[in-house]
Amino acid sequence: MTDKCVTDKVIVVTGGGRGIGRGISLLLAEAGARVVVNDLGASVSGEGASKSPADDVVAEIRARGGQAVSSHHSVSEWDSAQDIIATAIDAFGRIDGVVNNAGILRDRIFHKMSADEFMAVLQVHLVGSFNVSRAAAEHFRNQGSGAFVHMTSSTGLIGNYGQANYGAAKLGLVGLSRCIALDMSRFGVRSNCISPAAFSRMTANLPSETEHQKALLEQTRKGLAPEKVAPLAVFLMSDLASNVTGQIFSVRGNEIFLYNQTRPVRSVHQSQGWTPESIAEHALPAFKSSLTPLEAIADVFSWNPI
């Protein structure tokens, strides 16, 4: 039983009907929040719609004695996002937090990725997070409090193969969160990112042909349960995190990481200015030891989940 650290707070969880979002919705309710479970019920690639994912989580919360309502609106359209926040106001009279978790995948190696595949992913992850956050922002400003959690990804923070659209959207969320944190700090509003590593339907397409791959998949399934992400999200929604804003965290099984953020790491100066040739001769050698290696997620997280 978790402590009631978000008692009576009204929190919207987009993509709250499955996987990571479901785990967050359930733990928020257990910790005392009144939850709006928003889920369009689309496929991983964004097609179709179903009320069942959101409604099933709401039923589960209510069966445990919690308070929750469903929202089946899309985050990707401005008016629909306004309706998500209106659902919270209509049901519970206020809004205290937003977890921007909704997302889709349209993976493709970059030289074969279509414009539609690129834009569809940005529309849900980045534009959708803006839409819902902006809809909540006026309420937060007026009441002098509020919290955002945006789900970024190691694909954007580090890099991954076949996910240029997803990586662009997820790194864009880091910039969005940071600027929200700056703009709204004067109103007591916080904004942070979580990069979750979890086994869900969005990661279920890992190869499982050989015995080694099957064993690795099962280890991943057990070690990266989506529910592992929920405690950090609930903490960031609570007053326990009242002095935490503008940060990037990651959850990987039982590990929590704090990411650094982009800052200059080296500098060189030449009083007469630079030419392409002098950059090659002097600047590049000075920078060489500080250049970031071209690594993917598996290169950086080279150990099994703990």
Image (cartoon, rainbow, N blue to C red):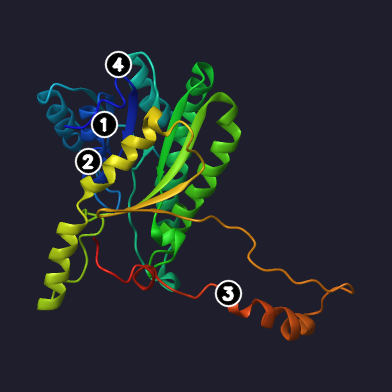
Q: Identify the amino acid type marked 1.
A: Leu
Q: Marks 2/4: CA distance? A: 22 Å
Query: In terms of depth relative to the viewer, which is nearer, 243 or 27?
Result: 243
Residue farthest right in this picture: 272
User: Considering the numbered disc 3 on the image, is that residue within a helix, a strand or a loop?
Assistant: loop
- Tag 4's secondary structure? helix
Q: Which residue is mark 4?
A: 91
How packed mark 2 is, by other alpha carbons closer than 10 Å (few <14, some 14-19, many 20 or more), is: many
Cα separation between marks 1 and 3: 41 Å
Tell me the distance, in whole angstroms, between the alpha carbons under discs 1 and 2.
9 Å
Q: Residue at x 26, y 52 (%)?
A: 44
**Which of pointers 1 and 2 lies earlier in the amino acid sequence?**
2
* Residue behind mark 2: 23
Residue depicted at 56% across the width and 24% down the height: 187
Q: Earlier in the sequence, mark 3 or mark 4?
A: 4
Q: Nearer the viewer, mark 2 or mark 3?
A: 3
Q: Which residue is mark 3?
A: 291
Three-letter amino acid code at the position of disc 4: Ala
